[in-house]
Image (cartoon, rainbow, N blue to C red):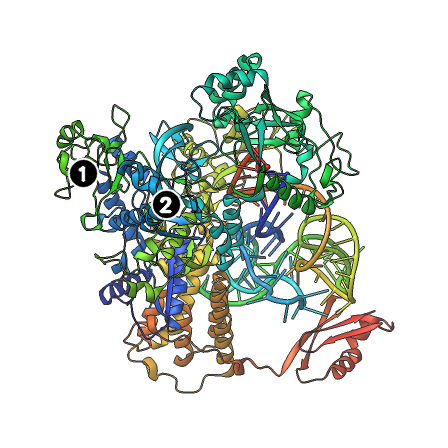
Amino acid sequence: MNYNFQEIEAKWQAYWSKNQTFQAHNNSEKPKYYVLSMFPYPSGAGLHVGHPLGYIAGDIYARYKRHKGFNVLHPMGYDSFGLPAEQYAIQTGQHPAITTETNINRYREQLDQLGFSFDWSREVRTSDPEYYKWTQWVFIQLFNAWYDQADDKAKSIDTLIRLFEKEGNAKIDAACDEDVPTFDASQWVNFSKKEQQEILLKYRLTYLADTEVNWCPALGTVLANDEIVNGVSERGGHPVIRKKMTQWSMRITAYAQRLLDDLDTVDWPQPLKDSQTNWIGRSEGASVTFNVLDGSDAERSRSAEAEISTKPNQPYQIEVFTTRPDTIFGVSFMTLAPEHELVAKITTSEQQAEVTAYVEATAKRSERDRMADVKTISGVFTGAYAEHPFTKEPVPIWIGDYVLASYGTGAVMAVPCGDQRDFDFAKHYGIFIPNIFEGIDISKEAFADKAKTVIGNSDFLNGLSYKEATSKAIAELERIGHGKGKINYRLRDAVFSRQRYWGEPFPVYYVDGMPQMIALEHLPLTLPEVEKYLPTETGEPPLGNATDWAWDTKNHKVVSNKMLNQVQHDSHSELDSESHGGVYPLELNTMPGWAGSSQYFNRYMDPGNTQAIYSEDAIGYWKDVDLYIGGSEHATGHLLYSRFWQKFLFDMGIAPTPEFAKKLINQGMITGTSAFVYRTTVNNKVTFVSKSRIKEFADYLVETTNGKESDLRPEKYSALQKIHADVSLVNASDELDVEAFKIWQPDYKDAEFILEDGKYIVGREVEKMSKSKYNVVNPDAICEEYGADSLRLYEMFLGPLEQSKPWNTAGITGVHSFLKKLWKLYVPFMDPDSEKGALTGNEANPTPENLKTLHKTIKKVEEDIENFSFNTSVSTFMICVNELTAQKCDHPAILKELLILVSPYAPHIAEELWQVLGHTESIAEATFPKFEEKYLVESTKEYPISFNGKLRFKLELPLDMSKDEIEATVMAHEKTQAQLQGRQPKKVIVVPGKIVNIVG
RNA sequence: GCCUUGGUGGCGGAAUUGGUAGACGCGCUGGAUUCAAAAUCCAGUUCUUUCGGGAGUGUGGGUUCGAUUCCCACCCAAGGUACCA
């Protein structure tokens, strides 16, 4: 009776599928528990061994919670919109839906093979119209909402309209665009419909705006900040430039403070919270306005404009944001970003040429150049001066590219004595550096230590600390009308438009340029067919290629664009569809990748619902995710946007909680071992050189040795032949054949290779698994050779879940032989002729040793699972099976409990052996064994006896011995006397049940 | 630069309130079994040693009877972020 894992695994996977063992129900007597693993993008490459790590951990926890009597929701789906399928479509003409379907089928096969307890009846796919209908629906909800900062929550746009009708917008504290004009109730009602819509658009939580975006010409699309790495696109590594476009945006900034505050309410990893905190980037300070002085040139340029200006006597004002209003008397110049709108207006004629040249030069430099070149100081004086709000002294206004247009107001008040960048700039251009700090030398560098700050040379701020001076400065600024306390966030509103085909279409059509939403009952608005997936010749997004992409508002359906031309002809300002046939152009952009993933966790609760995103009953029951597992790379993308949508839906009364996931765990990455490292001496320096071309080298060796092209001796290739078979088999101590290497890489033929212990050492370099690095390990081959249970155990055994670790297939034999040992314990029950058939086997009571081993294991495994320390529980199983084997344990009562403990980790073998013991039901719902302390009670303890903290020998003593008795016994012991050699100990520390330490 | 996490044998890693450092597994060494191999089983495996012992958890200090664990300073690695005013 051998452990035939292939047969067993296929059998139980079929059983679970047929019996729908893991289907969750939306109501139950049991308490609920929702375990979620982040759903994958189904790529063409399929799964590699790194992918399932988080799924296995989630599956163990889900199965454990079922044993613990919970009604567990453990769903899976696919984030199936995305760029790779689209690019494949561009190259081959294959519709992305077909590619996606093929890939999903492959993923499903691979996932099934690993024995996950997913409830597949709840599967979602973001590219399925029945799913993205609800993504479109959320978009409409956001469109129909505004953010009331007074109540700190989102509200229906209707409430805003009623406020406008009643009192105009002067008193409304809303998160909105900056350029909203002030109006009263009578003005509002007299605005045309289009004017009203334009104003409302500035308040909506998703809005259209001309945004400076990251445009990637090679991909023909806009990218979000988190899709750009080091100035190039994350996918493909193409250059990215800044460009102004009309785009949909999400007003996530309205939620900045709540996104920050509520991090305290969730049990998420600290690094992830920190990274969201940094991303939101709250800083406290003040906004200060400086009036631009009427210099002769500034005056002249302005008077030319004065003819059309309604307020000719109003000076230009520069608003700055500063975190150090306490240092305001240290201002000796101001710097504007070259892109700042006032630059053109205030520059004097003498400086005009120089300023224009600088602005043009900056605009040409890509973001990447500017980043690579942070040390060069550059700037130009505009010739204009501003007036210091307190001293009324003139302050020269400069422009410089160290000031970013996209942060704060794009202008800074420069305090060279308190800010190193201002200091460097002032030194470079010989600008005066006033010192406003008591007892601080600022001749060499700026002083920025807030804690040690005492203000001087600052009129009413003299002698004050940072804190006192800050609040006093703000109070004075407010009094004289030159500023106020302000909190600034780094977080920007999220651009929501992409110029792609394979994404959710917006449920939007345009009437006279104003966006209109398609009603829910007419959704989903499905993607149109297009002939090609590239932008149109006129530069429109791929949807511009569709022939049927216009909205017929009478019949509520998509119609041919031909209808449109006629309509657009006589389209005028009013929004009455009757007057021009009722056919309008549809939005050509699609939604970004994160749209579909921002609510999927809630949709799983009620995935088949056609009337609502989910029923109140379903979300009332499941509420939120109890445990969410996924990669840390989603920290500032998916996880931030999802929190934002959840808070919005919470405000609107659609979601019951402001946070969607109580606990989150980031699984580490499983890296591949791909390169080798060899040492060379270049210029008498030992250098490590690494190459990701190990496979090529190995191939080369096989070719040359088989083809007899060289006189290389095959016996020298041991290490490299191993490399050819499997990179993970290489040991650090394997020898490198230097001669072969030099022939392969002539660049190194003169390099001197250093011997280490008489060998040239082959090392390994750890990298992310990827196709191009020849280091992908595929789970299918491992399942074939060792089985899914072995793979599951091994991935857990590799190390702590949250840690990144290199994959090395070699160690899998350890867990595989553990499973074989486990199997052997049950062999006596497999022979139908044996006396020990099934549960009627050994009726004698289990021995104390058996019980001790079992209960020790129960305790440890339960603690480990609760702490997500899955690697240590695998060790515990090994110890348990080793002990029971040594004890020749054949008590069904013990063996049965052991199976339940093992089943979350290795479910197939557990089911099979469970059946061997005579059970007819699945082990999935079996009750988790109860730990009983009484089986672990000991009467004696092997005390470690240490001298000055160093262990010297051990002594077995009864546990009920008193402190004094222990001391007396230990002191009287011959080994103690031998250690002391007649000396009298200074002190004897006895901790009963733990240790004895003799200080001499 | 800043933030975060980490640094323990040849390797992955264990040590949960400060109390026997190196559990468990891989690898390696020796042995049993076998015609032989695979598989399996047994023993050993931190380093060093004059076989008494000595040293040892990135480095240097500190607290303590006792520190991988707590405190201070530093070094290194990984991840995040950055002219953020």
- Alpha-carbon neighbours of circle 2 within 10 Å: few (<14), some, or many (≥20)? many
Residue A576 badge: 1
Asked if residue A757 can be seen in this view, the reply is no
* Of residues A424 and B74, the one drawn nearer to the viewer in this rendering: A424
Q: Is residue A495 above or below residue A829?
A: above
Q: Is residue A149 left or right of residue A484?
A: left
Chain where mark 1 sits: A
Q: Is residue A976 left or right of residue A240?
A: right
* Residue furthest front in the image: A186
Q: Is residue A567 above or below residue A105?
A: above
How far apart, in angstroms, are the residues tagged by discs 2 and 1? 25 Å
Q: Could you tell me residue A520's position as x and y percent?
A: 22, 50
Quarter of the image with the N terminus of chain A in it: bottom left
Report which residue position mark 2 lands on. A205
Q: Could you tell me residue A782's position as x and y percent?
A: 37, 52
Chain where mark 2 sits: A
Asked if residue A294 can be seen in this view, the reply is yes
- Residue at 55 percent across and 80 percent down: it is A936
Q: Amino acid at mark 1?
A: Asp
In this view, the mark in front (2 or 1): 1
Q: Secondary structure at mark 2?
A: loop
Labels 2 and 1 in the same subunit: yes
Q: N-terminal of the two: label 2 or label 1? A: 2
